[in-house]
Image (cartoon, coloured by chain):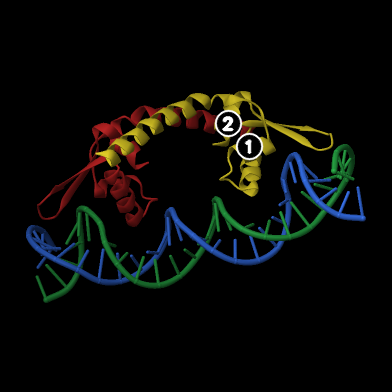
Chain colours: A yellow, B red, C green, D blue
Amino acid sequence: MILWHLIESTKRFNDLEKLIPEVSQKMLAQHLRDLEREGIVDRTVYPIIPPKVEYSLSEYGRTLIPVAEVMCAWGEVHNKRKYEESVS
Amino acid sequence: MILWHLIESTKRFNDLEKLIPEVSQKMLAQHLRDLEREGIVDRTVYPIIPPKVEYSLSEYGRTLIPVAEVMCAWGEVHNKRKYEESVS
DNA sequence: TAATGCACTTACTTCAAAGTAAGGGGTGAT
DNA sequence: ATCACCCCTTACTTTGAAGTAAGTGCATTA
């Protein structure tokens, strides 16, 4: 989910919070830390006030894009199928 | 995991139990039921004694194969990377 | 007669992941 | 002087997923 938004472009913490309101601050921070530790996202801190922290996909993280896309594509078909099921 | 083994061939409940010893009977049964309800696996019961129940990927389930493969491929690269990290 | 195999289900327990709520540190705006 | 913004962290609670253990039903085997 987080990654999905970072594919599009670099995002700030606050941006991600707004884009994914169903995830709490705690979880967002934790997952971002995990992704950073795995080297999947890059974290850039600007030492200004108010603070600004940018997250982006690392080169390594970008290798996940095809994986995300194939999963997403399948998910859409799956949803469509379930929808058609509920209609009929 | 379950699906991964079913890609290869049709399997009986007991086969899956032996192939994936780290998952309990309960979980296996539950996941198989879920997968069946989603139409991803087919369940064939042979009314013989002792009972025989076969699970296989449905046509729909087979659409997941490319997804599983791309995920698996990425996972291998990820593991390799982590291994090389731990060596250096 | 008792034990075994197959394919589960059920009841109870445990544990980690996630939710909730609050704080903190520093500055700029009201 | 106080509030708000930004990016989190910490402490406590809750929830749901999975583990464990036992039971079921029928027939063959020892």
For this rendering, which residue is in front, A48 or B86?
A48
For this rendering, which residue is in front, A44 or C15?
A44
Residue B32 position, x and y percent, is 30, 47
Q: Are marks 2 and 1 in contact (CB under 8 Å)?
A: yes
One can see residue B68 in this view: no
Q: Residue A1: name its quadrant.
A: top right
For this rendering, which residue is in front, B35 or A22?
A22
Residue C22 position, x and y percent, is 73, 60
Q: Residue D19: name its quadrant.
A: bottom left
Q: Is residue B42 above or below residue D14?
A: above
Residue D28 position, x and y percent, is 8, 58
- Chain on which label 2 sits: A
Q: Which mark is residue A16?
A: 1
Image side of residue D13 versus residue B16, left or right: right
Q: Quadrant of the C terminus of chain A?
A: top left
Q: Amino acid at mark 2?
A: His
Image side of residue C24 versus residue B27, left or right: right
Residue B3 position, x and y percent, is 33, 39
Image side of residue C13 versus residue C1, left or right: right
Q: Amino acid at mark 1?
A: Leu
Q: Which residue is mark 2?
A: A5
Crowd class of label 1 (few under 14; some 14 to 19; many from 20; radius 10 Å): some
Q: Which mark is residue A36?
A: none
Crowd class of label 2 (few under 14; some 14 to 19; many from 20; radius 10 Å): some
